[in-house]
Image (cartoon, rainbow, N blue to C red):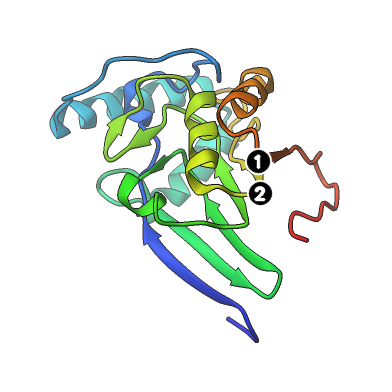
């Protein structure tokens, strides 16, 4: 990508938006939805799209419709995980709350940008627990020095709101005490790598 800059791309998992628990609080434990077949997931996605059509403003709906061609038939956009090797160190970027355990477990970035929205997904199944615990466990698994959250704000007004950071901070203290959780404010220049 440039002098001393390399990127490795890995397959990943999208959050389980078909579970209907997208509005659950970050500390709320979600269980169930295991063994749901592909046709059942597809039917749930159609229901979700119907709810979105009634809760979003027209400009948001038009944006989603214009971007729908980029999604795969599974509705996940072909989710990928990126590991950047930079002169300052390594940076992992994940844009949705899901992963393959066998892939994530072998990566050791210095800094990780981790998604914190929706019902998390590990190896194709919805996480049985909270989003806060999922993100903190990802940080522990990666052994990253720092984590910055992504895809966790009010990214779709009228449908998805920002999570409560309290449970996420607590989960990091308990599960990933050696990882610094950075919380930059909007439009603030924040150095995430030394």
Q: Is residue 10 above or below residue 95?
A: below
Q: Earlier in the sequence, mark 2 or mark 1?
A: 2
Q: Which mark is residue 163?
A: none
Q: Secondary structure at mark 1?
A: loop
Name the image quarter holding the N terminus: bottom right
Q: Which mark is residue 145?
A: 2
Classify residue 147 as left or right of residue 15.
right
Residue 9: which quarter of the image?
bottom left
Classify residue 27 as left or right of residue 4.
left
Q: In the rendering, at what x and y percent does residue 46 appear?
A: 29, 28
Q: Which residue is identified by label 1?
A: 179
Q: Is residue 125 above or below residue 99?
A: above
Classify residue 88 as left or right of residue 155.
right
Residue 10: which quarter of the image?
bottom left
Residue at 58% x, 32% y: name it: 156
Q: Secondary structure at mark 2?
A: loop
Q: Is residue 103 above or below residue 38?
A: below
Q: Considering depth in this image, is 35 or 71 the residue closer to the camera?
A: 35
Query: How far apart, in angstroms, are the residues tagged by discs 2 and 1?
Result: 5 Å
């Amino acid at each position: 990508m440039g002098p001393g800059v390399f990127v490795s791309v890995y397959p990943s998992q999208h959050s389980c938006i078909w579970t209907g628990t997208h509005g659950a609080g970050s500390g709320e434990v979600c269980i169930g939805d295991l063994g749901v077949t592909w046709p059942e997931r597809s039917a749930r996605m159609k229901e979700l799209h119907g709810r979105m059509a009634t809760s979003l403003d027209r400009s948001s709906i038009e944006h989603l419709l214009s971007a729908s061609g980029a999604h795969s038939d599974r509705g996940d956009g072909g989710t990928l995980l990126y590991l950047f090797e930079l002169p300052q160190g390594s940076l992992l970027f994940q844009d949705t709350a899901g992963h393959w355990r066998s892939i994530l477990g072998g990566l050791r970035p210095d800094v990780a940008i981790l998604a914190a929205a929706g019902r998390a997904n590990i190896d194709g199944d919805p996480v049985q627990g909270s989003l806060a615990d999922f993100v903190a466990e990802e940080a522990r698994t990666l052994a990253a020095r720092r984590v910055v959250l992504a895809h966790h704000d009010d990214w779709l007004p009228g449908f998805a709101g920002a999570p409560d950071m309290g449970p996420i901070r607590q989960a990091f203290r308990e599960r990933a005490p050696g990882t610094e959780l950075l919380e930059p404010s909007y439009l603030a220049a924040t150095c995430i790598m030394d």
